[in-house]
Amino acid sequence: MEKVSTRREKIIIFDTTLRDGEQSPGASLGLKEKLEIARQLARLKVDVIEAGFPISSPGDFTAVKTIASEVEGPIICGLARALPKDIERCAEAIRSAVHYRLHTFIGTSPIHMKYQMKKSPAEILRMTYDAVKLARNLITDVEFSPMDATRTELDFLIEVVSAAIDAGATTINIPDTVGYAVPEEFGRLIRILRDRLPILEKVVISVHCHDDLGMATANSLAAVLNGARQIECTVNGIGERAGNASLEEVVMAIKTRPDFFRFANSVETKEIYKTSRLVSHYTGLAVQANKAIVGSNAFAHSSGIHQDGILKERTTFEIMRPENVGVSESKIILTSRSGRHALNHKLKQLGYYLKDKELEKVYQRFKELADKKKEVFEEDLLAIMEEETTVVPETYRLEYFNIITGSKTVPTAMVRLQKAGKIFQEAAFGDGPVDACYKAIDKITGIKPRLLDYSLRSISSGKDALGEVTVKVEYKKQSIFGRGRSTDIIEASAKAYLDALNRIVVLPKRTTLISEKI
């Protein structure tokens, strides 16, 4: 019996964050930022990076040339209008790349030809052929785009595409430049072009969709179902006006629904979140909280019904694993809508395992607080638990400490602890006085947890205000909190750290246990 192949056809991911994405209002990037984003895109394993528009400015030319010289892996692409000077300048910028592509374009819709190009259809056809021919004489990999294709008359679009292929184009991109198309219509356009132009089978069909009507991702995927094999997109969906098709959305749609989209792509999805945050940081364009895949709420659950379901079985309300896109874990957001199951789960993460009666008592306190504020945080729960549970036995007690520090001095701490009536003393160096103090404590106790979080706040007023330090440490995959107070910040820091260590010491003996994360 003949074995059926399960190999999936590849969809090429063409990233234009550095070209179209940078055209977002206020998203200007310098050379250093562009180079760092390009390197991250290479780690993300996109197939093509459209690095810029070399003719547009000396700075853009330098950026494209630098990326071409220094970034390996993806094809490095430059954009050029259908003009000889643009094409020659672009070829000069990208030639130093290991793999490079020249992307040229021209407006083809009646409105673009009349008002922007001020050219007749015959002139547009001639410019298309000549531009692609020149580019192909300089570069072997040439992409052509009939700008505003979705508002171009079909017969003329076919003529232009045919001319570009005759001149040597290796990729034909069909852009929905103004986000005018709807999915069924756009998919049908790709299918009609394939049916009426069999020569398209010899080139890669690409699509470049804008999000003016909120359908860029849907249009891109509809095109793929009808024969397109390259999607042009941007990280976080940034770009002109309402932006472009979102890279993370098209990639994860294909990977999450292999039953429907029987294709593959080479993107390293665990780099998605990191790439999103890097682009957001450098462009200054914040990612909306409810943005698919990379928004802060994308894997957050606040509904009590959803929280209960997700804690029982993740797939009840999550179709993707957060770690698959580089997010550490799902978030349970405690609000007035949260139930006992979610509260109990959070308490276990903080180190508290309660019996049913204890949980009910704490839950009532939690509900009272949740009715007064939008979200209940870990610090709030710790405050409740401090009032409801007994004090942790003080295995180690701070007897004395001395810190030597200064602007030109290596911070040094000498710490003396008491345990069961005996005195232990150690000294250590550190990156700062608190770090040195903690390292000295680690030497004495032999316990070396990883510090996850450190916070300091004033709980009284005046120059001699009482300071409270809260620390969160990780020990054997378990999270433990500690808290200390003093008018001396270093002393408060040491007490908080010792409080956490004392909790670790008695973990097997207490009814209040640390629970590994679900």
Image (spheres, rainbow, N blue to C red):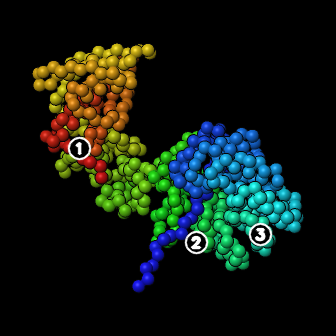
Residue 331 rendering spot, x and y as whole percentages = 38, 49
Which residue is at 87% across, 58% downward? Answer: 118
Residue 225 tag number: 2
Mark 2 vs 3, N-terminal side: 3
Q: Is residue 29 visible?
A: yes
In the rendered view, would you say 46 is above or below 121?
Answer: above
Q: Secondary structure at mark 2?
A: helix
Mark 3 vs 1, N-terminal side: 3
Which residue is at 30% across, 19% downward? Answer: 413
Residue nearest the observer in this picture, 324 or 499? 324
Tell me the mark number nearer the camera, choosing from 2 and 3. Answer: 3
What is the C-alpha distance between the residues marked 2 and 3?
26 Å
Q: Amino acid at mark 1?
A: Ile
Report crowding for label 1: few under 14, some 14 to 19, many 20 or more residues within 10 A (C-alpha).
many
Which residue is at 32% across, 33% downward? Answer: 471
Identify the residue position indicated by label 1 in the image. Answer: 514
Identify the residue position indicated by label 3 in the image. Answer: 166
Quarter of the picture containing the N terminus is bottom left
Report crowding for label 3: few under 14, some 14 to 19, many 20 or more residues within 10 A (C-alpha).
few
Tell me the mark number nearer the camera, choosing from 1 and 2. Answer: 2
| Left or right of 3, for residue 245 | right
Q: Is residue 192 visible?
A: no
What is the C-alpha distance between the residues marked 1 and 2?
49 Å
